[in-house]
Image: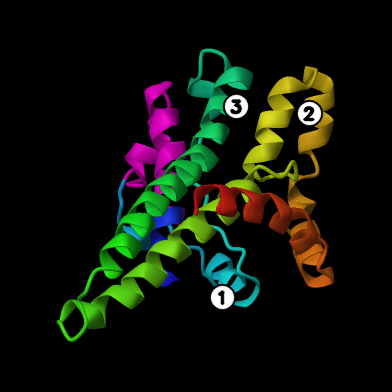
Amino acid sequence: MAVPFLLAITCHEVAHGYVAYMLGDPTAKSQGRLTLNPLKHLDPLGVVAFVIAKIGWAKPVPVDSRYFKNPRRDMMYVAVAGPAVNFALAIVFSFLYKWMVAYAMQDVEGSSASMVIPPIISMLEAGVVVNLILGVFNLLPIPPLDGSNILAGLLPPQSAYSYMRFSKYGFILIILLAVTGILGYVLWPPVMALYHFLI
């Protein structure tokens, strides 16, 4: 799962930074975060969380909303970009998975390809699952996840301000939900529904 996970979190963060850059914010670009080098985006705690709980995150791309013409609207666009890329990657992985499964059904017994195909198929399937998990997980309306920035853009300004003040407690809440198993009950139904739709 390492390869699709690294690709998923890297593309997720680059999408945030690129959309912010297109909307006028050069912060991510100036800090070298608009790169597909996963080492630039890894968050050690997020990687450990993924290994343990299959839910992880990358180091957030810096975004300065002061550069935006319409900060509330543009922050929503930036927030949507990450999960949208994950869902797009899940679709790409699903097509590659189906193609590789169809290829594997041909008579390749004894060929060198028969040694390589099974792990590739497993990796492609993992790519679907990983991207769906990250996409759905990041849409949860828990500050500072992407879903909270989307919701904040829809709320009245004062309500949005009060809501986003809980960002510093967000990861504590996420960890508690993960440890108690509640997070799994929330995530797995939509993830599996999308998985069966794609696969």
- Marks 1 and 2: CB-CB under 8 Å? no
Q: Is residue 1 above or below residue 163?
A: below
Circle 1 sits in a helix, a strand or a loop, which is it?
helix
Question: Which amino acid lies under the numbered mark 1 shown in the image of this protein?
Answer: Val
Please name the residue shown 43% across and 30% down the image.
19
Q: Magenta region: which residues?
A: 9-34
* Residue 92 image point, x, y percent: 37, 47
Question: Which amino acid lies under the numbered mark 2 shown in the image of this protein?
Answer: Tyr
- Asked whether 135 falls inside the magenta stretch, the response is no
The earlier-in-sequence mark between 1 and 3 is 1
Question: Which amino acid lies under the numbered mark 3 shown in the image of this protein?
Answer: Met
| Disc 3 versus disc 2: nearer the observer | 3
* Residue 25 image point, x, y percent: 43, 27
Viewer-closest of 159 and 185 = 185
In three-dimensional space, the C-alpha distance between marks 1 and 2, rounded to whole angstroms, equals: 34 Å
- Residue where numbered disc 1 is placed: 51
Q: Is residue 114 above or below residue 36?
A: below
| Disc 1 versus disc 2: nearer the observer | 1
Q: Is residue 121 left or right of residue 186?
A: left
In three-dimensional space, the C-alpha distance between marks 3 and 2, rounded to whole angstroms, equals: 14 Å
Q: Quadrant of residue 155?
A: top right
In three-dimensional space, the C-alpha distance between marks 1 and 3, rounded to whole angstroms, equals: 29 Å
Q: Quadrant of residue 21?
A: top left
* Number of residues whose C-alpha sits closer than 10 Å to that of mark 3, classed few (under 14), some (14–19) or many (20 or more): some
- Residue where numbered disc 2 is placed: 161
Please name the residue shown 37% across and 50% down the image.
95
- Residue where numbered disc 3 is placed: 76
The earlier-in-sequence mark between 3 and 2 is 3
